[in-house]
């Protein structure tokens, strides 16, 4: 009798175990299905945005095209299945930026009554020539977009990224003496942070309409450094660039 009871007990245990495995497997499949479905929905949504941005671009509405592209989260474009969308996103953006920069230069030549417009070039860097040039992203990280930053004498800015894409904008520069701004001790080659006193403030207007502020100064070893002064991932600095 005991042998029969033990056998029944073992059978129940095995059956329960198999049921558990089956349940876990079904749960994983359902989760994968939900993720895939969510990605497909996002891809469909972004395809619609790309179409709108392309139509604006082809009809000469470059600012409207870039504004439409703002509806796409760039981080999503690195995910599986988004490759073609990523390619088209940056192709459209590059085309928009090229025309906007060209228009900005024309408007500068024929002085407008309402002052500056998006991506209008300028001569503000003529008084600060040492801040013109090529910068490298300090503590380069292939998992982050930033790679190189190029500032031209007319204020044109290009940020080259680790995935071979680029962002375009125009900057203005002015004198600034603000203290206590977060940066790295770039002379040490480490991630040790420090507070600096700014010499200049550089405000970049990117083609998507967003503004970004950098504080420029000269390090102890004579290198020109830009920092946005923002904390990143706990005790790091968000963006520091060294010329």
Image (spheres, helix red, strand yellow):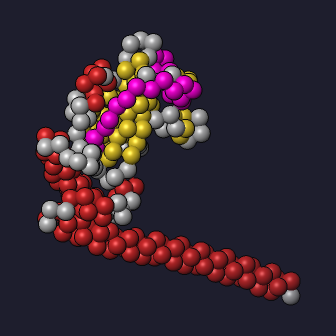
Residue 64 percent across, percent down from the top left: 26, 63
- Range drawn in magenta: 163-192
Q: In which quarter of the image is residue 76?
A: bottom left
What number of labels is visible? 0
Residue 139 seen in the figure:
no
Residue 47 percent across, percent down from the top left: 28, 70
Q: Quadrant of residue 38?
A: bottom left
Compared to 164, does 75 lie above or below? below
Compared to 118, does 7 lie above or below? below
The one nearer the camera, 192 or 66, is 66
The structure residue drawn at horizontal position 38% and vertical position 70%, both measured from the top left corner, is 42
The structure residue drawn at horizontal position 21% and vertical position 59%, both measured from the top left corner, is 62
Compared to 180, does 219 lie above or below? above
Residue 20 percent across, percent down from the top left: 65, 77
Q: Which residue lies furthest to the front in this view?
A: 113
Query: Does the segment drawn in magenta span residue 188?
Result: yes
Residue 43 percent across, percent down from the top left: 34, 70
The one nearer the camera, 122 or 183, is 122
The one nearer the camera, 39 or 48, is 48
């Amino acid at each position: 009798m005991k042998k029969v009871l033990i056998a029944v007990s073992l059978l129940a245990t095995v059956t329960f175990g198999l049921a558990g495995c089956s349940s876990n497997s079904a749960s994983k499949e359902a989760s994968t299905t939900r993720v895939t479905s969510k990605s497909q929905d996002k891809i469909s949504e972004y395809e619609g945005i790309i179409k709108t941005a392309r139509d604006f671009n082809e009809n000469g509405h470059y600012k409207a095209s870039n504004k439409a592209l703002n509806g796409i989260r760039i981080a999503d474009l690195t995910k599986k299945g988004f490759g073609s969308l990523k390619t088209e996103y940056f192709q459209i953006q590059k085309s928009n930026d090229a025309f906007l920069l060209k228009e900005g230069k024309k408007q500068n030549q024929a002085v407008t009554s309402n002052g500056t417009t998006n991506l209008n070039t300028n001569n503000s860097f003529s008084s600060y020539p040492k801040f013109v040039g090529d910068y490298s992203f300090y503590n380069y990280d292939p998992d982050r977009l930033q790679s190189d930053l190029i500032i031209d004498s007319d204020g044109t800015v290009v940020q080259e990224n680790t995935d071979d894409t680029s962002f375009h904008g125009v900057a203005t520069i002015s004198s600034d003496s603000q203290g206590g701004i977060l940066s790295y001790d770039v002379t040490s080659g480490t991630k040790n942070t420090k507070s600096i006193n700014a010499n200049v403030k550089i405000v970049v207007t990117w083609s998507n309409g967003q503004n970004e502020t950098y504080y420029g100064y000269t390090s102890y070893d004579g290198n020109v450094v830009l920092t946005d002064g923002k904390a990143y991932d706990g005790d790091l600095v968000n963006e520091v660039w060294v010329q």
